[in-house]
Amino acid sequence: MFRTSACCRGASHLLTRFFRNEGGATTIEYALIVGIIGGILIVSFQEIGGILSDDIFGAAMDALNEVTGGG
């Protein structure tokens, strides 16, 4: 009976220490923040790339085609 109670106390101590440790939670929170910011940047760059290719580079290509007579 003594071994069982010692075993339970050891397991209880490990569980208590596990739930008190907040270092892993902080790491996960920072990883989520970085992931969200990364997703926002990817969407933003895709939108900016679409604007650049359609408006700016499209106008430049049209002007070059007009000058060179290309179609």
Image (cartoon, rainbow, N blue to C red):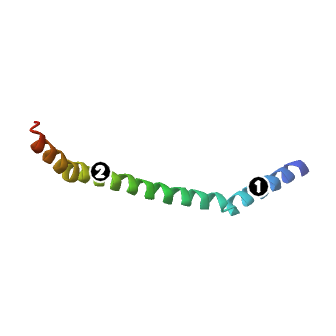
In the picture, measured across the screen, residue 26 lies left or right of residue 15, that is: left
Residue lying furthest front: 68
Q: In which quarter of the image is the C terminus?
A: top left
Q: Residue 12 appears at what percent x and percent y?
A: 76, 56
Q: Please state which amino acid type lies under the numbered disc 2.
A: Gly
Mark 2: secondary structure: helix
Most foreground residue, 46 or 5: 46
Q: Residue, x 89% and y 48% (percent of image)?
A: 3
Give me the C-alpha separation between circle 2 and circle 1.
Answer: 52 Å
Q: Residue, x 68% and y 60% (percent of image)?
A: 19
Q: Residue, x 82% and y 54% (percent of image)?
A: 10
Residue lying furthest right: 2
Counting other residues with Cα less than 10 Å from the Cα at mark 1, is it few (<14), some (14-19), or many (20 or more)?
Answer: few
Residue lying furthest top: 71
Q: Residue, x 12% and y 40% (percent of image)?
A: 68
Q: Residue 60 appears at what percent x and percent y?
A: 19, 49
Residue tagged 1: 14
In the picture, measured across the screen, residue 51 lies left or right of residue 62, that is: right
Most foreground residue, 69 or 33: 69
Mark with earlier residue (2, 1): 1
Q: Residue 4 appears at what percent x and percent y?
A: 85, 49
Most foreground residue, 66 or 25: 66
Give the image quarter of residue 15.
bottom right
Counting other residues with Cα less than 10 Å from the Cα at mark 2, is it few (<14), some (14-19), or many (20 or more)?
Answer: few
Mark 1: secondary structure: helix
In the picture, measured across the screen, residue 6 lies left or right of residue 42, that is: right
Q: Residue 54 appears at what percent x and percent y?
A: 20, 49
Residue tagged 2: 49
Q: Please state which amino acid type lies under the numbered disc 1.
A: Leu
